[in-house]
Image: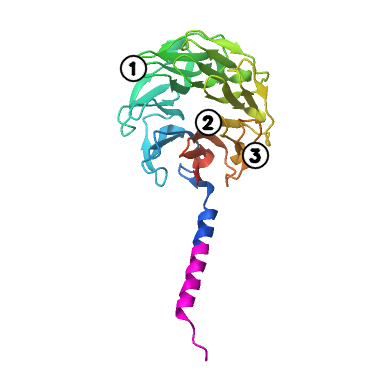
């Protein structure tokens, strides 16, 4: 009987194991969904302070956080029954959460949170405020947009500003009464706001005055993102995607391979950007938003919010789903 070369057998086994491991690594790349929220409850906001520390907000004041880049998550609950609409940090220590009509803040990188300001209908002639989006352009100057409603009907837009780092907030009027849902500032002076009926507003004096930009659409616009002063993108209902290369003087509609609602858009540079939306939609562009291709999110849950940078990719949505991009 011929002797088996044990060295050769060991070598062959090693090659097979290496191939298997390589295949498994390949199989685990891309977008990977997991349920991190409570079943039946939506996750609606996501923000990362850095490559390790991130926060996800959802219904009924639920807040989960990671300190290891999303490998594991822990739970927090804010003292509110409202859905968390936005999570944002103006630096690595000071953060803000918007939930219904309340602003929460943290000064220790999100370890502890406390109520900063609670706006009541009595502050707005009986209309209930809903705070949707918060951004800062500098250490002191920040802005919030939202809406005022009576009996589930929006009756006016809401714009708040701070000049002391978020300690106090004041209202300023805008040239629209439409519901406003998201804003983006690229400096302390230049910013954009989007909302209902294709509304796009622009400021170049830190929000003191605003002008209306022509979007050319009537769909609700859910999110806006700019890279520098010129290049920007806005997404909304019915597969609406708008693109500008001149700071919003002109907005052009872009065709995408889906017709459902698009909820969030984020570019990490002039060329590379992502969009998330209904039924697990994730779209990718590598040419500045001129063309888009679908990526496999491996979920059919609606994806409401997106965070992207050069190291982190994370989207959250309905039924507690959290989808991370694994390189």
Q: Nearer the viewer, mark 3 or mark 1?
A: 3
Earlier-in-chain disc, 3 versus 1: 1
As for residue 175 lying within the magenta part, the answer is no
Which one is nearer the viewer's eye here, 87 or 6? 6
Is 43 located above or below residue 99 in the figure? below
- Circle 2 SS class: loop
Q: State the image coordinates of residue 49 (x, y, percent, origin top left).
A: 39, 33
Which one is nearer the viewer's eye here, 175 or 290? 290
Earlier-in-chain disc, 3 versus 2: 2
Answer yes or no: is residue 176 visible: no
Circle 1 residue: 167
Question: What residue do we see at 62% from left, 33% from top?
Answer: 287
Q: Residue furthest bottom?
A: 1
Real-space CA distance between mark 3 and mark 2, rounded to the nearest whole angstrom: 17 Å
Q: Is there CB contact under 8 Å for labels 3 and 1?
A: no
- Circle 3 SS class: strand
Q: Which mark is residue 6?
A: none
Real-space CA distance between mark 2 and mark 1, rounded to the nearest whole angstrom: 32 Å
Residue 275 is drawn in which quadrant? top right
Q: Quick check: 103 left or right of 173?
A: left
Question: What residue do we see at 55% from left, 31% from top?
Answer: 264
Q: Nearer the viewer, mark 3 or mark 2?
A: 2
- Circle 1 SS class: loop
Q: Which mark is residue 269?
A: 2
Q: State the image coordinates of residue 177 (x, y, percent, origin top left).
A: 56, 12
Q: State the image coordinates of residue 279 (x, y, percent, origin top left).
A: 61, 40
What range of the chain is rendered magenta? 1-20
Majority secondary structure in the magenta region: helix
Circle 3 residue: 293
As for residue 13 lying within the magenta part, the answer is yes
Real-space CA distance between mark 3 and mark 1, rounded to the nearest whole angstrom: 43 Å
Question: What residue do we see at 57% from left, 44% from top?
Answer: 297
């Amino acid at each position: 009987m011929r002797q088996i070369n044990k060295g050769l057998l060991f070598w062959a086994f090693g090659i097979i194991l290496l191939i298997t491991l390589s295949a498994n690594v390949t199989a685990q790349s891309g977008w990977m969904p997991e349920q991190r929220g409570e079943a039946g409850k939506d996750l609606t906001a996501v923000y990362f302070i850095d490559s390790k520390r991130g926060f996800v907000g959802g219904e009924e004041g639920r807040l989960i956080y990671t300190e290891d880049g999303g490998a594991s998550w822990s739970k927090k609950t804010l003292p509110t029954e409202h859905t968390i609409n936005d999570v944002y940090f103006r630096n690595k220590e000071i953060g803000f959460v918007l939930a219904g009509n309340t602003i929460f803040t943290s000064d220790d990188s999100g370890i502890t949170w406390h109520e900063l300001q609670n706006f009541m209908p009595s502050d707005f002639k009986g209309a209930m405020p809903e705070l949707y989006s918060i951004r800062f352009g500098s250490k002191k100057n920040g802005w919030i947009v939202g809406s005022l409603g009576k009996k589930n009907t929006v009756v006016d837009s809401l714009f708040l500003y701070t000049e002391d780092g978020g300690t106090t907030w004041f209202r300023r009027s805008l040239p629209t009464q439409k519901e406003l849902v998201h804003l983006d500032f690229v400096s302390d002076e230049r910013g954009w706001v989007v909302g209902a009926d294709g509304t796009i507003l622009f400021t170049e004096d830190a929000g003191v005055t605003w002008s209306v930009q022509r979007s050319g659409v009537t769909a609700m616009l859910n999110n806006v993102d700019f890279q520098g002063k010129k290049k920007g993108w806005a997404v909304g209902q019915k597969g609406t995607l708008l693109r500008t290369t001149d700071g919003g003087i002109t907005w052009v509609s872009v065709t995408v391979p889906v017709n459902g609602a698009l909820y969030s858009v984020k570019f990490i540079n002039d060329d590379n950007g992502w969009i998330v939306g209904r039924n697990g939609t994730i779209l990718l562009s590598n040419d500045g938003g001129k063309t888009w291709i679908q990526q496999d999110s491996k979920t059919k849950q609606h994806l409401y919010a997106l965070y992207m940078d050069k190291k982190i990719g994370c989207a959250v949505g309905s039924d507690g789903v959290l989808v991370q991009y694994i390189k």
